[in-house]
Image (cartoon, rainbow, N blue to C red):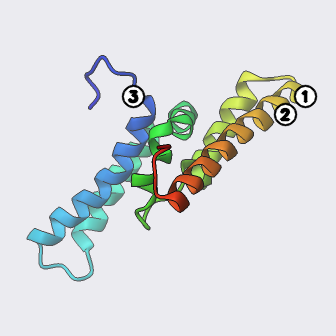
Amino acid sequence: MFDTNVSNLGEVYEDNDYMIEKIRVAINAIENDPHEFFYREVKDILTKSWNKMTTPLHLLAYAVNPKYYAVELLSDPERTLPSKDPEVSQGFKKVFRKLFVDPEIGLQIRAEFLLILWDQRVEVLILIVCGTRGQ
């Protein structure tokens, strides 16, 4: 996942987020632990490590990756738009505040970014309603 020639900064966030759930399923398949004590210990360790690695730039890359707005992914009721995730939203806002010190320019850039995200949401909704991929 990390040793490729493909640009995948946003995928680091996505993959780590879902890795924890996959580990829970694997532990539950082996352990007889209805209260998930062992899983909670493992999750705590993984979450602490993950929190050290997660940067606002990872979150921004995740939020702008069109892959995560695909109808196939969003048809899963467990998924949400990256831009609707509070942690992701805070991350890209933090990046914009650092990049654009002038508040007026920062506001304009954030407004443009939100319009791009809105366009992606509208496109996803159209694809879901029509049941096509632009055919």
Horizontal and vertical percent for residue 101?
Answer: 81, 23
Q: Which mark is residue 104?
A: 1
Task: Using the image as rendered, state which of residue 36 and residue 67 is in the foreground.
Answer: 67
Q: CA distance from mark 1 to mark 3?
A: 31 Å
- The residue lying furthest to the top in this view is 5
CB-based contact (under 8 Å), mark 1 and mark 3: no
Horizontal and vertical percent for residue 46?
Answer: 32, 50
Could you say whether the residue bearing mark 1 is in a helix, strand or loop? helix
CB-based contact (under 8 Å), mark 2 and mark 1: yes
Residue 87 to residue 11: above or below: below
Amino acid under disc 3: Asn
Q: Which mark is residue 107?
A: 2
Residue at the spot of label 3:
8
Residue 16 lies left or right of residue 82; in this view the side is: left
Amino acid under disc 2: Leu
Residue 120 to residue 80: above or below: above
Q: Residues within 10 Å of mark 2 (few under 14, many from 20)?
A: some
Task: Using the image as rendered, state which of residue 101 and residue 76 is in the foreground.
Answer: 76
Could you say whether the residue bearing mark 2 is in a helix, strand or loop? helix
